[in-house]
Amino acid sequence: MSAKKTNGENGPITIKKYANRRLYNTATSSYVTLDHLCQMVQEDIDFVVYDAKSGDDITRAVLTQIIVEEEAKGQNLLPINFLRQLIGFYGDNMQWMVPRYLEHMMEGFATNQEKLRQSMQETFGGIFPFGNLEEMGKQNMAMFENAMKLWTPPGAATPSDDEAAGETPQSKAEADVSAAESLDDLKTKVEELQKQLEVISKSEKPDK
């Protein structure tokens, strides 16, 4: 990933949040909205948010609020089962590992996604022949969700939709095996796709 854009030599842009919930961008001397901050994140512009009265760093809370707002608009990136699993880690003795694990997974996902996008541009000029990118995104999220299942600590599991309907759930061992098999299957598909891209890329290169 590229380095985050900052406010010149002064580091991240400072955003102040006032009691009336208004957000003030000190770099542009103007009030902004959560939509503005969302766009800044997407443009890789680094910023921190402080409570104007207490001076506390509330960046995490504001970023979480942005996610809630985007999910409410129908931008559903977070599957329900993933949210339940994530909530289940709060207060658990494995909680300290979750942020590092999620950060590592997302960095890897972003890196691989950028490589795939670049490969598509170089090979096909932006035309993607293997189906909808949205479908690939769903598959990547499924892989991410299955990986989280393997990390679910004892007692942190929440009732599934089948359990809520009174159906008999899979045993823990069967669920783990199923998740692992799904993850392995997706990895195999990704490897096959990469091989196809390499073959096509080589065939497109002119002979010297």
Image (cartoon, rainbow, N blue to C red):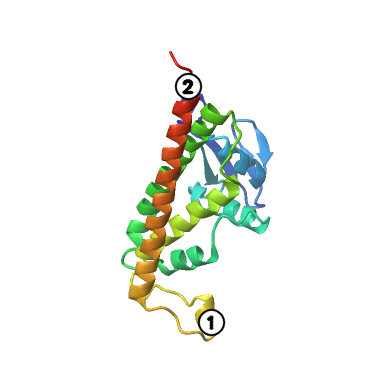
Q: Closer to us: mark 1 or mark 2?
A: 2
The residue identified by callout 1 is 164
Q: Residue furthest left?
A: 93
Label 2, secondary structure: give it: loop
- Rounded to the nearest whole Å, what is the CA distance between mark 1 and mark 2? 56 Å
Does the image show residue 1? no
| Amino acid type at mark 1 | Ala
Residue in the image at 50% along x and 31% along y: 118
- The residue where tag 2 is placed is 205
From the viewer's perspective, is residue 31 above or below residue 176?
above
Quadrant for the N terminus, please.
Answer: top left
Q: Is residue 6 left or right of residue 125?
A: left
Proximity of marks 1 and 2: CB atoms separated by less than 8 Å: no
Residue pictured at 44% horizontal, 56% vertical: 143
Amino acid type indicated by mark 2: Lys
Check the picture and name the quadrant holding the C terminus.
top left
In the rendered structure, the answer to whether residue 194 lies left or right of residue 120 reads: left
Label 1: how many Cα within 10 Å (few below 14, some 14–19, many 20+)? few
In front: 101, or 206?
Answer: 206
Mark 2 Cα-neighbour bin, 10 Å: few <14, some 14–19, many ≥20:
few
Residue 29 seen in render = yes
The residue sitting at 54% across, 37% down in the picture is: 14
Residue 53 in picture, x, y percent from top left: 56, 49
Which tag, 1 or 2, sits closer to the chain's start? Answer: 1
| Number of marks in picture | 2
Q: Secondary structure at mark 1?
A: helix
**Image location (x, y in percent) of residue 172:** 35, 75
